[in-house]
Image (tube, rainbow, N blue to C red):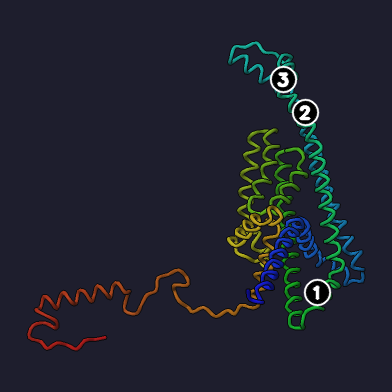
């Protein structure tokens, strides 16, 4: 046995053990890493506001606290408005349930010649086996729901704590990161950080502005139609349509259509038409102007980045995919050398016209010349000296 073989085997086993340990640790910490990534992008989004307040003499910690207070107040107000709307709809449905049940029973009795009554139907439902099983399963599922809610609250608390520290101690964090890098690398890291702050903050602010415009437009429509809970529905449409990529518009429009349908079925058609028309206005007129200087990426690239982010990290990846791709595109654009494009018609989608006609026309003329030579008895014609070949 060679002398190096035992050491090589020990080294290989050690590397394999380290790989297994790293894989196990990564699987255990993937949730925490995703929370830190979300917190980092949230800190990048609010850092411009924090930096402006800090430049005016306010401490970064207090500035970060005020920004988070505004965000939390807005989120709590939205949840309260949406919860009151849903609670009101549920109460109305419960109060109107006997009328719905009577109408259904009357329709069944008229069409199927039965003699059902509401009391019999209610007794059969209350004493049915499937209802008892459903109640038992719901009782056992309350603990799971409580655990999920507590886990979600703990995750939100973790994200807010990390994002608070990232935003409040941003300069200290950049200084600590640059202290272990040479000067050339420090400049690249600071440039990438600045681009990430600009793109992420610009993405958030442009989306917030479009959400505000969308909410106001839909609020005016709902007030004109007399749909209840117009403020909550307008806020729902504005936020969901802008911060859920690709399918957010259709998810946002479904709830106002449902509420409008309870008032008048034709109102739901009006809401659907307005959502479609406003979406076209937003895509072709509003969005290009607002996002031209913030997240100017091609729609196909944005759509592909959302799909890739969803495949990698689910809903979180869909939310941070566009600012991440915009940051990467802007960072690489500073290092990719670009050249002037020649004034070629093919660049504009037109066919290239050669001097003297197209290639096909020249080929036809050459074939026509051969046929005429053969008709005259050979190349150059009979009795005439052959002309030298032309290139």
Instruction: Residue lying at the far front in this picture: please name it.
Output: 1
For image coordinates 91% across by 65% down, the residue present is 61
Which residue does the image show at 89% across and 64% down from the upper left?
63
Quick check: can you spot residue 92? yes
Q: Secondary structure at mark 2?
A: helix
Q: Which quadrant of the rendered structure holds the N terminus?
A: bottom right
Q: Is residue 294 visible?
A: no
Label 1's element?
Answer: helix
Sequence-wise, the earlier of marks 3 and 2 is: 3
- Give how far apart the Cα atoms at labels 3 and 2 are: 13 Å
The answer to which image quadrant residue 311 occupies is bottom right
- Residue 198: image location, x then y, percent: 74, 69
What secondary structure is marked by label 3?
A: loop
Left or right: 371, with 175 as reference point: left
Q: Which mark is residue 128?
A: 3
In the picture of the structure, the residue carrying the numbered disc 2 is: 136
Considering the image in quadrants, where does the C terminus appear? bottom left
Callout count: 3
* Sequence-earlier tag: 3 or 1: 3
The residue labelled by disc 1 is: 177
Q: Residue at 86% across / 62% down in the picture?
A: 164
Q: Is residue 55 above or below residue 92?
A: below
Asked whether, in this view, residue 359 is left or right of residue 309, the answer is: left
Mark 3–mark 1 distance (CA, rounded to whole Å) = 66 Å
């Amino acid at each position: 046995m060679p002398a190096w073989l035992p050491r090589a085997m020990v080294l290989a086993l050690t590397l394999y053990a380290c790989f297994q340990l790293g894989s196990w640790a990564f699987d255990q910490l993937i949730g925490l890493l995703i929370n830190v990534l979300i917190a980092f992008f949230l800190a990048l989004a609010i850092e411009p506001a924090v930096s402006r307040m800090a430049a005016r003499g306010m401490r970064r910690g207090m500035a970060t606290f005020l920004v988070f207070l505004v965000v939390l107040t807005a989120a709590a107000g939205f949840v309260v408005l949406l919860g009151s709307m849903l609670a009101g709809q549920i109460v109305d449905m419960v109060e109107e349930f006997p009328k719905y049940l009577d109408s259904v029973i009357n329709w069944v009795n008229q069409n199927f010649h039965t003699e059902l009554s509401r009391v019999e139907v209610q007794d059969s439902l209350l004493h049915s086996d499937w209802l008892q099983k459903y109640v038992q399963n719901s009782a056992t599922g309350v603990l799971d729901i409580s655990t999920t809610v507590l886990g979600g609250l703990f995750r939100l608390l973790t994200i807010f704590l990390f994002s608070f520290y990232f935003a409040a101690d941003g300069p200290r964090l950049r200084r600590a990161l640059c202290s272990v890098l040479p000067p050339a690398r420090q400049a690249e890291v600071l440039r990438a950080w600045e681009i990430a702050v600009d793109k992420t903050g610009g993405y958030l602010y442009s989306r917030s502005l479009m959400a505000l415009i969308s909410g106001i437009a839909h609020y005016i429509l709902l007030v004109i139609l007399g749909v209840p809970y117009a403020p909550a529905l307008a806020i729902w449409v504005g936020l969901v349509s802008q911060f859920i990529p690709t399918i957010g518009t259709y998810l946002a429009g479904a709830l106002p259509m449902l509420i409008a349908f309870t008032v008048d079925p034709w109102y739901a058609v009006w809401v659907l038409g307005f959502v479609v028309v406003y979406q076209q206005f937003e895509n072709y007129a509003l969005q290009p102007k607002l996002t031209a200087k913030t997240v100017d990426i091609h729609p196909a690239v944005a759509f592909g980045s959302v799909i890739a982010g969803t495949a990698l990290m689910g809903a979180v990846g869909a939310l941070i995919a566009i600012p991440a791709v915009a940051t990467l595109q802007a960072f690489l654009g500073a290092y990719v050398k670009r050249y002037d494009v020649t004034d070629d018609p093919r660049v504009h989608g037109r066919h290239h016209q050669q001097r003297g006609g197209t290639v096909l026309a020249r080929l036809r003329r050459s074939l026509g010349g051969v046929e005429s030579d053969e008709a005259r008895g050979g190349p150059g014609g009979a009795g005439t000296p052959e002309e030298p070949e032309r290139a």
